[in-house]
Image (cartoon, grey):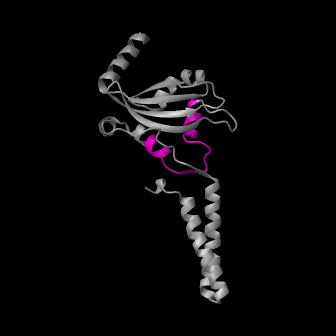
Amino acid sequence: MFGKVSLARVLLTVGGILTIIGFVAYFQGNSTLNLVGFFYGVPVFLGGLALQAAQLEPAPYSKPTPPEVLKLREEQATPTQNQVRKDVTRYRYGQSAHLEESLERIGVDPAGDDCPQLEAIREEEIDGCYALILEFASGTVPIALWQEKREKIERFFGPNVRAEVIPTGQTHLEVALITRLEADTLAADQATAQVES
């Protein structure tokens, strides 16, 4: 719940109110309120400004999640899918992009400031399975590199997740994290075992 509220805005509001009370109290000669306003209001307000500068807005949903997909999420979503969804839809502080560390570990985060940006998410049903779709602006990272890293993305966000990388433009793509049902997982393991033998 706290991640859904901007801590920076809360501190700016509280700090602003206390500072105004301090100014009013100063001009009215009320030294107690004056001290409270200045000694608490100004630092809280400055803390709010600092957080505002380091704040990363929650990723929006590109379209509403239908009730049948919400039901599918409850039945099929893996803990990792739920964690990713919750993490990217709350305020973050001190990061330049959502999933920044994850993208770095996967190998699609370039050195420098042009990190792929998560623009939105959505939830869908794909082949009867729950899918969390992450919509990225890829920046300077070529989409071919994302496609090369598909298996690594799958392992990183697994277990029981199948990943698909879908280009949607020259610099935009979607990463679909699709729940792998038990039968699908068994079939995939058998196919891997046949390839290896």
The magenta segment is: 83-106
Quadrant for residue 33, please give it. Answer: bottom right
Question: Which residue lies at the image location 54% right of the left edge and 40% below the top edge?
Answer: 99
User: Is residue 145 positioned above or below 56 on the image?
Assistant: above
Question: Which residue lies at the image location 50% right of the left edge and 24% below the top edge?
Answer: 166
Quadrant for residue 44, please give it. Answer: bottom right
> From the image, which quarter does the C terminus lie in?
top left
Front-lying residue, 21 or 178: 21
Relative horizontal placement of residue 110, taking residue 103 as reference (left or right): right
Relative horizontal placement of residue 113, taking residue 124 as reference (left or right): right
Q: Position of residue 131 (x, y in %)?
A: 39, 32
Question: Which residue lies at the image location 64% right of the left edge and 32% below the top edge?
Answer: 139
User: Is residue 13 positioned above or below 95 on the image?
Assistant: below
Relative horizontal placement of residue 130, taking residue 102 as reference (left or right): left
Magenta span contains residue 89: yes
Relative horizontal placement of residue 160, taking residue 166 as reference (left or right): left
> From the image, which quarter does the N terminus lie in?
bottom left
Magenta span contains residue 130: no
Question: Which residue lies at the image location 54% right of the left edge and 25% below the top edge?
Answer: 168
Disc tally is 0
Which residue is outermost to the bottom? 29
User: Is residue 156 positioned above or below 193 on the image?
Assistant: below
Which residue is outermost to the front? 63
Front-lying residue, 46 or 194: 46
Q: Position of residue 41 (x, y in %)?
A: 61, 73
Q: Position of residue 36 (x, y in %)?
A: 60, 80
